[in-house]
Amino acid sequence: MAIKEWDDWSGGWIWPPANQGLAAKEQRHELVYFRKVFHLPEQGVYQLKLALTADSRYRLYINGQRLWAGPCKGHAHVQYYEQLCLEEHLRPGVNVLAVAVVHYAGTAPFEMGEDGPLSIWRSQQGGLLLEAEVTDEAGRVVERLHSDPSWKCQRHQGYRLQPFPIMRWMGGLERVVNDIAYREWTQPEYDDSAWTAAETVSPIRDEYGQLTPWQLERRPIPLLYEEERLFQHVIRSGKGEDNAMPTGDWPEALELFLDRPAAPVEGIHVHAGERIWLELDAGELTTGYLQLMLQGGAGSRITLLYAECYEEDTGEDEIRRKGVRDHFKGRVLRGGYDTFFPAGYGTAAHQEIYEPFWFRTFRYVRLEVQAGAEPLTVAGISYRETGYPMQLQASFHCSDERYNRLWELSVRTLQRCMHETYEDTPYYEQLQYTMDTRLMMKFTYLLSGDDRLARRSMDDYRASQLPDGMLQSRYPSVLPQVIPSFSLYWIGMIYDHYQYFGDIDLVRRYRPAMLSVLDWFGQRLTPQGLVGRTPRQYWHYFDWVEEWDLGAPSCTESSPATLLSLMYAAALGTAAELFAAGGWTQIAEEMLERKAAVNEAVRSYCRSENDLLFRDSPEAGEESQFSQHTQVWAILAGTVDEAEAGKLLEAVLNDRSLARLSLPMSYYLFRALERSGQYDSSFILWERWMKQLELGLTTLPEIDSVATRSDCHAWSALPLSEFSTGILGVKSGRNGITVEPHCGSLHQASGAVMTGSGLVSVSWKLHSSQEKESNTFWLRADWSPGVAITFILPNGEIHLNDRGAFERTIAIARTG
């Protein structure tokens, strides 16, 4: 079956009749099971090729075998479909295609916390679209299967979402009352005679150009991986109320749940009316599909609570106090939970299995079982880890083990924030924000050279553009949000991609959208030439800073924000370079003229009298406020010359009165130091990251505060960029590849970095001698022959080499 096009789908969108069980308006979220039985000749080898999608999510089964989940998250203008070729799951005789589909509530208007995940687009109507061909070994079509009224379907009457204010962006977790009627429903032998024929609710296309809710495009990224995992530890367990007992008194729990060789056990038996609980440790923060295996237990209530860490019980959802994440004494697990009421049909041979429809994020899982009138056996609990299949190519190791641990945490943090989109936090939101995503895209290039997820992200943001030219700050999202400064990061994404991959066609594709973004700012200049106040319907946000309520200096509530003008000026310069590269030289010149005018306005109206620093707004006197942010962006925007930049950086690094950059915004401080030739001063910045190593984290948090919400937020994974391009010194741009390592207090570093021309491996050592007046520095690099690399050594030597290997030993001045 060739790649599906608009004109060769044979079926239509199907859904149960509205009068089957609960109507959609009575059941806020719908879980629907679909089946299609078909017969294959007894003799032969068969292959199944299929294309499918659903609104809102599906899980595909063939002959009882659980397969892929989808569709890839789309948005208001695109519905992605998957196309698969499967060979090993068919058999002669009776076969069945089975698909479970969840349709989340419609979005007009959207009710935060109750209407399902913000990041998963949906229409007012649920639907399944599938097309399949079964071919024999000669390539002949034996069966054609497509979604039409020949499919059987059944609504699950016991499916609900329960809201949790602490993670309201996820739109609720599951509450499922199972029914014996659904036992083995994915198997060919299941009797579906009582099921209803599906109805066609929409054709694929309309002959008159009237658009359906689902504009089909093939999935732009690979399928997510799924790998079986077991838990590592049982932290606590108990019976009755929360009076914990040592896990040694419950030996079967240790054997049943943990990732270690053990003799088979029968499971944990829970007597009728008894309550038991376990707290399980996956060993690291992860994302996966939980799977709970049960026997008996009709009338029982089971909860699975997912948590990133142990923390204080403050009694308030929005108040967090975290310390060492794996210290559990006197602490609790907090978070959302799924609730499952088993039908009780599970046996030792055929267990009843509960699995949440969407993946969960956790390091710890608390399992609670309240048995009903019948006893219950917990036969097992495991999970399938899932994520984007990034192929890790880069590596890093150095003489300071703390840096090595930070690298490990950073890699894992990025991996956990990559699924069908980049994500700000996989636990709380799973939303793709522009500020976060620009950094994660850069990290991905350096680690793997893979730009497929980045390409879809850039296109997502372009598709989010509003009529006034502004981009939405997170997308896909069924609840629109705009942060004006975030649209400027999107231009930075395009610049980063061009520098790394040199794809000028991609730049040209986005030129009109870039112009619209920049014109939004240009139309809002004040008579002084500064970007005016943010419209009230948009979020005036820059960074999470202790002194800034809602992410912006208080002085900018009634006055222009200097920082927004500086970010606009920097974006004008970036866009000018991109426009010039694509042949729009006249527009590029205009962008540079605009940049110069904005910088002049900032110098004229936002600089302190008799001081080098820039105020956060034009307001002078007692109302003046200052931040590291404004000084750093003055450097990046070219508002100051090299000498002034050095003085500004000195203030940023030493003036404690300045509002401080967050972990992610510090990326731009690294860039300012790099631009000013002061990158060696950046090593003192790592102390903020080093403190995270004392907290038992396995990923990096949202902010470096005891009150941080998320323990996994890849915008903090700056070691991935700085250890690669700073310590190892490998930089890739349109002017070629350079290797300029920085030592700091390190004595040795080695690793590999992906560039636009392939992998570059670097190893260097610094040997200090008290007897001599100089140190010895040795460097070795290996890469693909024919690629020219410029080496800049610590003593100032410059070498150009394209032979694929370079080695040099030099003497450098001894430092304190």
Image (tube, grey):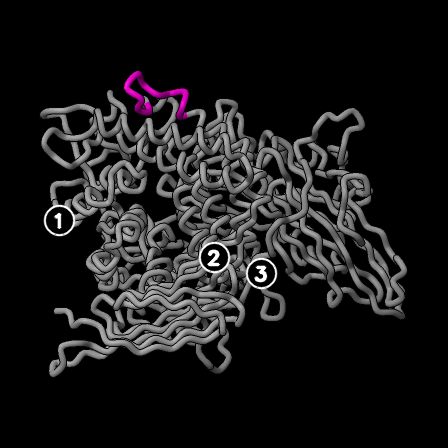
* Callouts 3 and 2 close, C-beta under 8 Å: no
The range drawn in magenta is: 521-531
Q: In this view, does 419 lie above or below 748?
A: above
Sequence-first tag of 1 and 3 = 3
Q: Which mark is residue 352?
A: 3
The residue carrying mark 2 is: 445
Residue that label 1 marks: 654
Q: Position of residue 692 (x, y in %)?
A: 25, 59
Q: What residue type is labelled 3?
A: Glu
Q: Distance between the residues labelled 1 and 3?
A: 62 Å
Q: Where is residue 765 in the image (x, y as percent from the top left)?
A: 29, 77
In three-dimensional space, the C-alpha distance between marks 1 and 2, rounded to whole angstroms, equals 33 Å
Quarter of the image for residue 126 reads top right
Q: Does the magenta stretch include residue 417?
A: no
Residue shown at the point (31%, 18%) measured from the top left: 526
Q: Main secondary structure of the magenta part?
A: loop
Would you place residue 262 above or below residue 75 in this image?
A: below
Q: Looking at the picture, tell me which residue is in the foreground, 812 or 286.
A: 812
In percent of width and height, residue 686 lies at 23, 59
The secondary structure type at the circle numbered 2 is helix
Q: Viewer-proximal residue, 509 or 287?
A: 509
Q: In this view, does 384 lie to the left or right of 213?
A: left
Question: Is residue 529 on the magenta stretch?
Answer: yes
Name the quarter where the C terminus is drawn: bottom left
Question: Which kind of residue does numbered mark 1 sit on?
Answer: Asn
